[in-house]
Amino acid sequence: MEATVECEANTKHSIWLPMTLAGSMFFILGCITWLNGAITPFLQQMLVLSPLQASFIISSFYIAVTVAGIPSAMLIKRVGYKNGMAIGCAVMAASALMYIPAAKMQMIEIFLFAQLMIGVGQTILQTAVNPYVVKIGPEKSAAVRVCIVGLLNKFAGVIVPVIFAAVVVTGVVDGSGQLSQQQKDIMADSLVMPYVLIAGLIFLFAAFAKLVPLPDLVFEESEGNSKGEIKEALQHPHLVLGVVAIALYVAVEVISADTIGSYALQIGIADYSVMTSYTMACMLIGYAIGIALIPRFMSQQSALTMSGIAGIVTVFAVVMGSNDSFVIANLLLVPFGGPELPDPLLCIALLGFANAMMWPAIWPLALAGLGRLTGTASGLLIMGIAGGALGPLLIGLGNVAGLGAQGAYTVMLPSYIFILFYALKGHKMRSWK
């Protein structure tokens, strides 16, 4: 049998130093994940890619989750959670350096391989740090700890695209007309130093994870094998359903964050490029409220239930709203000097608020009572992140099917309905019978 997992961090040491370690890891994850949205159009322009070819840049990142999920769990069981964080950061840093020859040679194949390997590194890091956050303190307040580190993750998502635009994009090319080879070379050269700095920063975080004097989650040696662990883990319905819930959550998160700009463009909003910031701001507010309310005033289950309901209601508001109505903007934005934006557009942003508590609540509910299976279960949950590759595809298919840009958001309803089911019943299931 695999080792039992025992958390000693919260009894022998203050929880805040372990949280500092975990928070720094979530910040790095946010930097890497949300940089995808900035680098993709940049590479599309530089390499003259079709939209379909450009979509592979993000897809290769998420495909890595499926490929590396279970191997990451096996690795964590062998080396421990802290060492796993260090290894994950080291893989991401080394992968970031691959962008340099990719830029110099201007080859999409090398970029895709670099994205794949960065995805592998973040999968290892995710597999290590998520259960670490859940297990370093009381189970009933796990969602609060996930919220705290999630704030850092989303904050990275707010600032990294802005920094990338300021350091790399500004002044490189104006984006009009066909690029000359000289312009492409300038764009490629502008990537070199930023990625050297990114790699250096992540290597520093790897050293921090390795050297910081904190206890790991303790594994006691025992007999067993990984295939047996996976099979045993799959006997727990609340875990399996949790994996599905994570996949569907990531899908709707990507839709709300990554398609809002495209929708704004289609309805003629001039500042469509900043719309993702609205979704991220709503998510940050949701995290902050979660930290304030859980577990004193609200359980993790209740938070997930309310999130599922909020998602369903908000999707209906997106689909049924009028682009000629500005009620929400006139209440929340215009009085404070903000722009007058259509209600459906702001409702897409409000989906970020509905989504905020899903990841923090699903993780502890799915890992509850698994003990020695926590590592394997975490690997399975991390694989659910691959659901992010489905989100924009589903919206695109909805558009092609004749639902239109606004009606296509109905494809999100089954995801929210399943998440509501998981909150009400799925997480309680301990047998398939």
Image: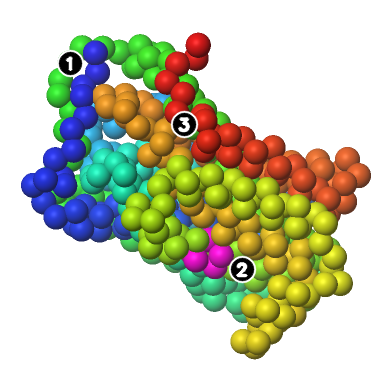
Is 260 located above or below residue 13 in the figure? below
Question: What amino acid does circle 3 point to?
Answer: His
Which residue lies at the image location 58% right of the left edge and 55% below the top edge?
354
x, y (%) of residue 145? Answer: 33, 53
Name the side, left or right, on which 68 lies relative to 392: left
Residue pointed to by mark 1: 222
- Which is more toward the observer, 217 or 417? 417
* Outermost residue toward the front in this view: 297
The residue stretch that appears in magenta: 281-285
Is label 1 in a helix, a strand or a loop? Answer: loop
- Indicate the quadrant where residue 396 lies: top right
For residue 427, the mark is 3
User: Majority secondary structure of the magenta segment?
Assistant: helix
Which residue lies at the image location 86% right of the left edge and 72% below the top edge?
324
Name the side, left or right, on which 24 lies relative to 334: left
Q: Separation of disc 2 and disc 1 at Cα?
A: 49 Å
Residue pointed to by mark 2: 278
